[in-house]
Image: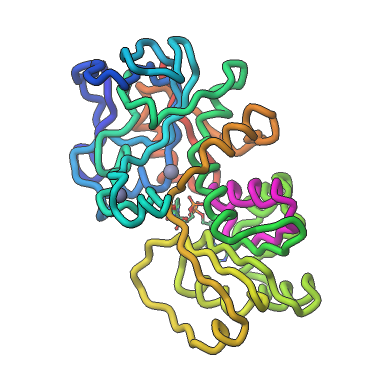
Amino acid sequence: MKAVQVRKAHELAIQEVDKPQISNPKDVLFKVKRVGICGSDMHIYHGTNPLATLPRVVGHEVAGEVVEIGEEVAGIKVGDHVVIEPIRYCGKCYACRKGRQNVCETLSVFGVHEEGGMREWCVLPENQLHVVDRDIAWEEIVLAEPYTIGAQAVWRGEVEYGDTVLIQGAGPIGICILKMAKLQGASVMITDLSEERLKFAKESGADITVHAGKEDVPRRVEEWTNFEGANVVIDAVCLPMTFEMSFQVVSTAGRIVVLGFDERTAAISQLPITKKEVSVKGSRLQTNQFPKVIKLLNEGKLRQKGLVTHTFSLEDVQEAFNFVERHPEQVRKAIIVFN
Ligand SMILES: NC(=O)c1ccc[n+]([C@@H]2O[C@H](COP(=O)([O-])OP(=O)(O)OC[C@H]3O[C@@H](n4cnc5c(N)ncnc54)[C@H](O)[C@@H]3O)[C@@H](O)[C@H]2O)c1
Ligand SMILES: [Zn+2]
Ligand SMILES: [Zn+2]
């Protein structure tokens, strides 16, 4: 079978590899149908993801159809449409015991620490797969994983009905956060530097869009919230400057949610944190968000509506990576189609 492998930095190849087989009674064999290309796949391709070792079969946004199940698989049938939950964890460490398997001491992420889903067939244990209704298009369900990133950020921010939520950044992650925050009943302001991305954020449900390069974001937040500040600030730009701004615009008793991996320091004083009693929370991948997202997909409440802008066949995967690299302004989400 064919698998897409990053062999070394900037070198992608379609390799011929052995088709995987069921070796454990809880395993499921599935035919891959769609794989989304994510910013982190691009980082692996550029050799700039410190967590990934090369060569690596990339892809963690994966949807497929079940073709064979192990003897002890109880909740999945042949023919089911599934999406993968890309985290493997120990179940014993402190984080796992606290129900936070996403930050397990020995966390292994599918397509990062281990071979991912950009290949024709995969075998995974049943507990890493979730069944979605068969009548929903593959282009919809392949977004389940990025939606869980949004769901996690909204959960970490304790977003409630009526809260004011400022999302910094209207890239694909900002849009997934936006969709989840709106479903929670929040009022959402979103910022970006791209008019096109702000226009799409508006179409995706944002109440207010702000051009961070042309407008004064703290001023706009003051006007919008009548000087209260945003109850939740979620940073999906992930630069030291956006992190710093979060403390300026958050309300009293507010929450700041951080998603970035940037190692540069930011200048944050203690005063706003103590005075406003702000909670600053990291949000990494997701924990227990798949069932929620799948319910919303099955109910038709979560639809991509223009988030997927490009599809490429497996044979054109190099072209796909080149296109995403060269035209970030045109690509929201690009998908690889497997036949
Ligand atoms: N923690 C996690 O689990 C997790 C998961 C996925 C992605 N991420 C991180 O989330 C971030 C966003 O991911 P993405 O795929 O949407 O990236 P992206 O680069 O497509 O989007 C970032 C957006 O921010 C905008 N931007 C840049 N500077 C800005 C500013 N000063 N103010 C407002 N907007 C600004 C850009 O125009 C762009 O549209 C990345 O840093 C990524 O590493 C974290
Ligand atoms: Zn991703
Ligand atoms: Zn663990």
Residue drawn 70% across the image and 50% down it: 184
Q: Which residues are magenta?
A: 169-190
Establish if 85 lies above or below 3: below
Q: Is residue 129 left or right of residue 56?
A: right
Ligand 2's quadrant is top left
Establish if 199 lies above or below 278: above
Q: Quadrant of the N terminus?
A: top left
Q: Is residue 300 left or right of residue 259?
A: right
Residue drawn 67% across the image and 50% down it: 201
Q: Is residue 293 left or right of residue 188?
A: left
Q: Quadrant of the C terminus?
A: top left
Residue drawn 46% across the image and 20% down it: 75
Q: Is residue 61 visible?
A: yes
The image quadrant of residue 28 is: top left
Q: Is residue 331 visible?
A: no
Establish if 200 lies above or below 75: below
Foreground pick, 84 / 12: 84
Foreground pick, 288 / 52: 288
Residue drawn 37% across the image and 77% down it: 265
The image quadrant of residue 233 is: bottom right
Inspect the magenta stretch and tell me whether residue 184 lies in it.
yes
Inspect the magenta stretch and tell me whether residue 292 lies in it.
no
Colouring convention used in this rendered image of the protein = rainbow
Foreground pick, 110 / 23: 23
